[in-house]
Amino acid sequence: MYTPSSFREERLEVLHGLIQAHPLGALVRHGADGLSADHLPFEIAAPTPDAPFGILRAHVARANPLWRAAGGDAACMAIFQGPHAYITPAWYAEKQRSGKEVPTFNYAVVHAHGPLRAIDDAAWLLGLVERLTARHETGQATPWRVSDAPAAYIDKLLKAIVGIEIPLTRLTGKWKLGQNRSMQDQASMAHGLAADSQPGAARALGALIAANVTPAS
């Protein structure tokens, strides 16, 4: 990924924070049939001596050939897309002076690299499913728990999935937030995005830019 120094994000807690906030990752690998991608909700665990950038964990259907490709030295990459939005040149000071500006697209993204491992263990899978469920049910008025379903039913479903784990050997972050522009332009972008008529990613990006306004390099 092309990453100019002004857009490079290397703080581990920030990179993990984006993964936690946007856990649906695109897992890309090169197999016998060429490139393939699976879209999976991940959890990110703390670094270990063998995984200096943390560990990604998820599960797939047993019928998915992905887990059978695990093992050996074959590397894979998981891509996590954070807030993103179109940036109009109307928000730049130079647009008012000379008109010499063009649009762009700003975003935050993390690429996570490491070997793929398969884990076919019922207890490990149950722990993962319980953690993922607890996290994503937090906002519900009455959070659902795995134990709400009959134990025999859960046991049957666990047999239909396989865990995957990626000990991360490299973690690359690109925060393209207009850091190469003046503080005035950065503030103007943040303000414009905050007022976007279609809230969501645009407003989230605006908040991210506002929190990261830096002098132009």
Image (cartoon, grey):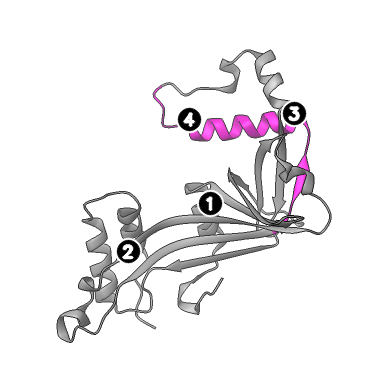
Question: Relative to the observer, which residue lies in front, 181 or 80?
Answer: 80
Name the N-terminal-most of marks 2 and 4: 2
Residue at x 50% of width, y 22% of height: 144
**How many residues crowd around disc 2 within 10 Å: few (fewer than 14), some, or many (20 or more)?**
few
Residue 121 lies left or right of residue 101; in this view the side is right
Residue at horizontal 23%, vertical 55%?
Answer: 196
Question: Left of 3 or right of it: where is 159?
Answer: right
Q: Amino acid at mark 4?
A: Glu
Q: CA distance from mark 1 to mark 3?
A: 25 Å
Q: Amino acid at mark 3?
A: Ala
Residue 171: quarter of image: bottom right
Q: Amino acid at mark 2?
A: Tyr
Q: Quadrant of residue 30?
A: bottom right
Q: Is residue 110 above or below residue 148?
A: below
Quote the CA–CA distance across marks 2 and 1.
22 Å
- The picture places residue 114, in percent across and down from the top left corner, at 71, 58
